[in-house]
Amino acid sequence: MKHNKFEPKIAKVTINIGVGEAGDRLEKAQKVLERITGRKPVKTIAKRTNKDFGIRKGMPIGCKVTLRKKEAEEFLKKALRILNNKLPSYSFDDWGNFSFGIPDYTLFPDQKYDPEIGIFGMDICVTLERAGYRIKYRKIKRRKVPVKHRVDREEAMEFMKKKFGIEVIE
C-alpha cells in the first residue's frame, strides 16, 4: 500500500433496486428501501429506449437512496454482516469503489417478509475518496483529482479490511 497523508473515507453508499417497470412493483420497491434505510427513495429514470424489455426513454424503472457519513457506515456494517463480512475481489474497481448485491431484503435483521410486497434484492455501491476530493465538484477553480490522490483498488481493499474487518476472497 502506498503511503499517503490522507486516509480514504466513505463518501457515499448508494442502495439501488432496479425493477424495470413503473407502477405497482416500483411502489413496493420504494417501500422496501424506505423500511431499510429510513429515507425517502428517488425514482431512477431510463436513459434510453429498449424495445426488447418494453422500456421507453424517460420512464421510471427503479429507485435508489444515497446515504452519507455516519448513516452510510451504519448501513454498510449491517449489509456486510449479511455477506458474513466477505467480499470477492472482483467487487472492487480501479478507482477504489466497490459494489455488491443482496438477494433479499428480509436478510436484514430487523425486516420481516411481507406477502404484499414480495421479494426484492438490491445493489449496494460504495464510493471511497480521501480529503481533498472537493476540487472535483466545487464551483470556483474546479480541477481534476490527480492520479496520485485517487484511491486505488488495493488501497480500497486494505481500507475495508482495516475499518470493517472484511475478508477479500480472490
Image (cartoon, rainbow, N blue to C red):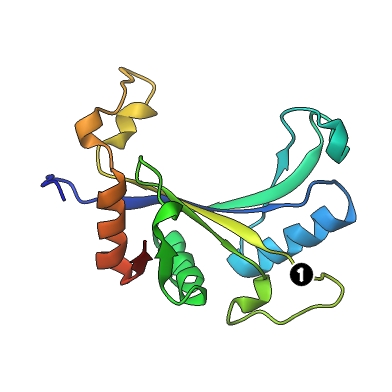
Farthest residue, direction front: 170
**In the foreground, 20 or 67:** 20
Residue on which disc 1 sits: 119
Farthest residue, direction top: 141
Where is residue 91, by image quadrant? Answer: bottom left
51 lies above or below 17 = above
Residue at 10% of width from left, 47% of height from top? 3
Tag 1's secondary structure? loop
Horizontally, is 26 left or right of 6 in the view?
right
Residue at 49% of width from left, 73% of height from top? 83
Near mark 1 (Cα within 10 A), the count class, few <14, some 14-19 or many ≥20, is some
**In the foreground, 140 or 114:** 114
**Residue 118 in the image, given as x and y percentages of width and height:** 81, 71
**Residue 71 in the image, given as x and y percentages of width and height:** 46, 62
Residue at 70% of width from left, 49% of height from top? 63
161 lies above or below 142 = below
Where is residue 134, by image quadrant? Answer: top left
